[in-house]
Amino acid sequence: MIDVKKLVSHWRSGALSSWDDAMYLLEGKRVMLGMFAIHLALEKAIKAHVIKHTGNLPPKIHNLIRLTEVANLDVNVEHRKVLAEINDFNIEGRYSDDLLSPISLKEAKVM
């Protein structure tokens, strides 16, 4: 049996840390890496919800939309679109082969 409270706290803490990293990177105009860190922050936050909802460890996946489904989070259409866009930065951050067009800091802030 897992310690749900401890694991939720761990994932939330990791999410906040990744968010801080993202803001630091974006301020330094490291936009693509900053967006990857935003994806990571959201992934960790949603995985905390997965644990809280299921009482189990989250699946080892990175798709934000799928994770919201596992966590049984009610996500509206507009937020799903944003999550889908941010999912792309997970791939770009891991396999940076210019799969995505460069994004400006202004565009990142609009997301």
Image: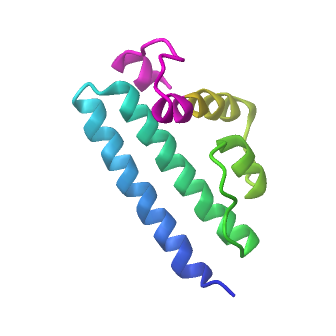
Magenta stretch: includes residue 14: no
Residue 23 shown left or right of residue 37 in the figure: left
Residue located at (29% from left, 27% from top): 30
Magenta stretch: includes residue 105: yes
Q: x%, y% of residue 49?
A: 64, 62
Residue 74 shown left or right of residue 3 in the figure: right
Residue 34 shown left or right of residue 76 in the figure: left
Residue located at (48% from left, 11% from top): 101
Residue 14 appears in the picture as rendered: yes
The one nearer the camera, 107 or 34, is 34
Above or below: residue 7 compared with residue 63: below
Q: x%, y% of residue 35?
A: 43, 32
Identity of the residue furthest to the left in this view: 28
Residue located at (47% from left, 16% from top): 98
The one nearer the camera, 92 or 65, is 92
The one nearer the camera, 90 or 96, is 96
Give, as a single range, the part of the protein colored magenta: 89-111
Q: How is the image coloured?
A: rainbow
